[in-house]
Image (cartoon, coloured by chain):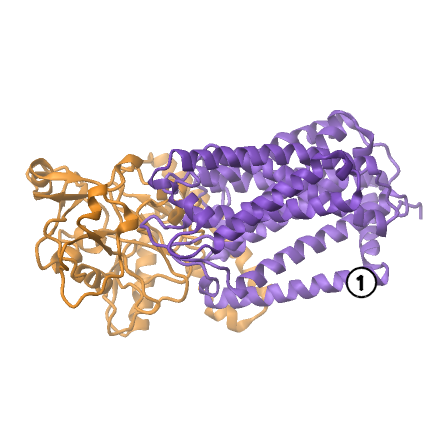
């Protein structure tokens, strides 16, 4: 009963915290709400006329939505890059910020689920997937596996951050023998969500570009670049707008970790490119499309090379200590890494996989304006959720939001 | 096959689930509070079970409801049935590529028979045109042109490869479907429960033959054009947001008729029959002709065979 009473105050306190703030905070939230409204409007258009409002068609039957989904699963999984040093090795500088990484995971998973949902032709029938209510095709369908691990990862992370913040809110010390096993469970699950998402594609023998064992390792390595890079930027913003203390040491360490991940990521890419082009087969046509374009269109190739350039430059920025220790350069490297991975893992993964189609047709897909607006709306929801959660977390961490005896 | 006990359990589970959903759906409607939306919304079809979990009575109810619904909508006497597979029958299809002239009569006959949307246009059969010389490098789908448009066919130095669902024995599409909305029936026909499909299109990504088509927009078939002899898992009207494909004309073949594409073929290039009957024409062809299947290296084991000579 007492805990319930505490929790009630926790919820009400959180609501109070998110509803007040500086003018900049209101402007930021207002902007996000505007983006969300645009997205909702675009989605209503899609829901009433069908997915014909997108530019997906039979030959390229997955597009921008699923590309964003693949990228965001990586962002969600990337929290482990901080979780492992913070909890397993108890490294101080990360202990202060790991909560924020976990909150980013939660927001990213919400976006993932929304991206898959807007991609459905008949979302109102999604209960057909639910165990008990529907008939999930388990264990055959990797999509069912993905839904299971994504939901499990979401619940676990959500639980961990809520528990830790709640304990801090009530002034109690958290119980390590209770929460540490849950945190340890979240580590293999993070690897799991991204591996299973890769397997969703790798298992398709109809699509030679995806039917490759390197896909899961590449998914993980690129995730460990983009996710921490995003966090690094977020930390700097939070440090300037909030009272939260984040040491430079933590930022530099994250940069160093991204350097390793990016080196591995580029190595995996090189291995794949070598296999495709040195031992070229009919199946290499997809890689050819990706790197050089086919049938007179090389738009995708430009993006591919751009992603490579971004990632390579980012690697230099993260790797060379004299560059890494300069915050503006470190931030620029983060932007490059995020852009590079977003291209290579979004459209760079989806489009070559489906172009040419299984019957050889070349359909040049570019997302429609409506598709982009729906996607922007989902990003808006994720960023808003993250903003609100971080605001509460910061106020609790710095001790401004505390349970007070009435 | 499930035991009677399992069947009973399923039904009990189904009943409680149905009640739960009914309550939930009514609640949701009350929350939305939109009388217009509630009117357009068909609760009975929304709460319908997966076809494979329905009892015979439940299937009859659905067939009756749909027959009435479509009869009213199209102003003609529509019957929807769900005739099951025959014993000791597995269907196989043969196509003689040395005879096919690429006239696409099969494509149009299929559209009419199977109520494919005219606008937006959906066609289950696709005919690829190849340069004969190009095929010296092997049949590479990329060399095929589905958009050929000649005054007369066959064009010189070309050959034709019509394709539709291969009704694979090891079908990747049914394997990946997250809801179990598509499966292979005992007679080998890969069917789709259009009321159970959620439109995720994972099956389309998985199919190596491009057989599956998605209803990106609202499908349209005029009352005049609609074929009123329908099968629940075959040619009955589809809704927006679901996947469809060739069903070997399930509404015909399970009543002992040939598929519409076979009947439309002017050169007799199309053959169809029971693979389990040693005296069937299809078995004769498999034995005496040079036969191949497409993308055999993928081990999907199609039941659609190409032959020549």
User: Which quadrant of the structure image shows residue B53?
Assistant: top left
Residue bearing the label numbered 1: A26
* Horizontal side, residue B22 vs residue A187: left or right: left
Instruction: Give the image location of residue A196, x and y in percent.
Output: 52, 36
Chain A: give its colour.
Answer: purple
Residue B292 seen by the camera: yes
Residue B303 seen by the camera: no
Relative to residue A84, is residue A106 depicted above or below?
Answer: below
Element on which disc 1 rests = helix
Instruction: Give the image location of residue B199, x and y in percent.
Output: 43, 54
Foreground pick, B4 / A19:
A19
Foreground pick, B85 / A265:
A265
Report the number of discs.
1
Q: Quadrant of the N terminus of chain B?
A: top left
Instruction: Give the image location of residue A133, x and y in percent.
Output: 49, 46
Foreground pick, A217 / A97:
A217
Q: Residues within 10 Å of mark 1 (few under 14, many from 20)?
A: some
Chain B: give its colour.
Answer: orange
User: Which quadrant of the structure image shows residue B284?
Assistant: top left
* Horizontal side, residue A184 vs residue A41: left or right: right
Instruction: Give the image location of residue A10, x and y in percent.
Output: 82, 47
Foreground pick, A207 / A46:
A207
Chain of residue at mark 1: A
Q: Quadrant of the C terminus of chain B?
A: top left
């Amino acid at each position: 009963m007492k805990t319930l009473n505490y929790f009630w105050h926790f919820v009400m306190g959180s609501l109070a915290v998110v509803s007040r703030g500086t003018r900049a905070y209101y402007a930021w939230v207002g902007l996000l709400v505007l983006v969300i409204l645009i997205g909702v409007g675009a989605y209503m258009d899609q829901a009433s006329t069908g997915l014909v409002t997108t530019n997906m068609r039979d030959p390229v039957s997955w597009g921008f939505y699923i590309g964003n989904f693949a990228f965001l699963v990586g962002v969600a999984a990337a929290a482990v890059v901080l979780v492992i040093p913070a909890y397993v090795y108890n490294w101080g500088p990360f202990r202060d910020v790991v909560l924020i990484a976990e909150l980013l995971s939660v927001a990213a998973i919400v976006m993932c689920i929304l991206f898959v949902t807007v991609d459905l032709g008949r979302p109102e029938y999604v209960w057909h997937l639910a165990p008990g209510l529907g008939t999930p095709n388990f264990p055959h369908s990797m999509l069912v596996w993905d839904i299971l691990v994504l939901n499990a990862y979401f619940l676990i992370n959500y639980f961990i951050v809520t528990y830790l913040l709640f304990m801090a809110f009530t002034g109690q010390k958290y119980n390590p023998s209770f929460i540490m096993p849950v945190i340890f469970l979240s580590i293999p699950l993070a690897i799991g969500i991204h591996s299973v998402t890769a397997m969703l594609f790798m298992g398709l023998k109809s699509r030679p570009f995806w039917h490759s064992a390197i896909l899961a390792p590449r998914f993980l390595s690129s995730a460990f670049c983009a996710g921490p890079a995003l966090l690094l930027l977020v930390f700097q913003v939070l440090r300037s707008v909030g009272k939260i203390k984040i040491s430079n040491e933590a930022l530099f360490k994250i940069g160093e970790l991204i350097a390793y991940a990016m080196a591995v990521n580029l190595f995996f890419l090189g291995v794949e490119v070598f296999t495709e082009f040195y031992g070229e087969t009919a199946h290499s046509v997809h890689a050819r499309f990706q790197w050089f374009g086919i049938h007179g269109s090389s738009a995708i190739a430009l993006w591919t090379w751009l992603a490579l350039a971004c990632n390579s430059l980012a690697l230099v920025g993260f790797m060379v200590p004299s560059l890494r220790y300069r915050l503006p350069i470190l931030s620029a490297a983060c932007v490059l890494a995020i852009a590079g991975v977003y291209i290579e893992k979004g459209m760079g993964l989806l489009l070559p996989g489906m172009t040419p189609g299984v019957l050889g047709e070349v359909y040049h897909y570019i997302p429609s304006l409506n598709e982009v607006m729906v996607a922007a709306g989902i990003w808006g929801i994720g960023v808003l959720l993250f903003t609100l959660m971080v605001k509460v977390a910061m106020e609790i961490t710095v001790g401004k939001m505390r349970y007070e005896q009435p | 096959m499930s035991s009677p006990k399992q069947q009973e359990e399923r039904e009990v589970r189904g009943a409680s689930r149905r009640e739960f959903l009914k309550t939930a759906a009514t609640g949701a409607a009350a929350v939305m509070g939109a009388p217009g939306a509630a009117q357009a919304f068909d609760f009975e079809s929304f709460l319908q079970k997966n076809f494979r979990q329905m009892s015979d009575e439940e299937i009859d109810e659905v067939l009756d409801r749909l027959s009435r619904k479509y009869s009213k909508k199209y102003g003609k006497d529509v019957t929807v049935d769900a005739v099951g597979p025959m014993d000791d029958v597995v269907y196989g299809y043969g196509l003689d590529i040395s005879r096919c002239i690429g006239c696409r009569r099969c494509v149009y006959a299929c559209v009419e028979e199977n109520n494919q949307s005219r606008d937006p246009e959906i066609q289950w059969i696709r005919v690829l045109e190849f340069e004969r010389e190009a095929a010296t490098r092997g049949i590479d789908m990329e060399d095929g042109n589905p958009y050929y448009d000649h005054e007369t066919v066959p064009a010189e130095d070309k050959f034709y490869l019509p394709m539709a669902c291969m009704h694979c024995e090891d079908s990747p599409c049914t394997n990946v479907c997250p809801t179990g909305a598509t499966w292979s029936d005992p007679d080998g026909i890969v069917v789709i429960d259009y009321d159970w499909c959620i439109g995720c299109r994972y099956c389309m990504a998985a199919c190596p033959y491009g057989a599956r088509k998605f209803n990106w927009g609202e499908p349209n078939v005029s009352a005049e054009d609609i074929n009123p002899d329908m099968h629940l898992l075959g040619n009955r009207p589809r809704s927006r947001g679901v996947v469809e494909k060739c069903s070997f004309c399930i509404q015909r073949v399970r009543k002992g008729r040939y598929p519409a594409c076979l009947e439309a073929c002017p050169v007799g290039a199309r053959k169809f029959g029971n693979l389990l009957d040693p005296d069937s024409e299809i078995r004769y062809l498999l034995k005496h002709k040079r036969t191949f299947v497409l993308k055999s290296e993928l081990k999907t084991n199609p039941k659609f065979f190409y032959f020549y000579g």
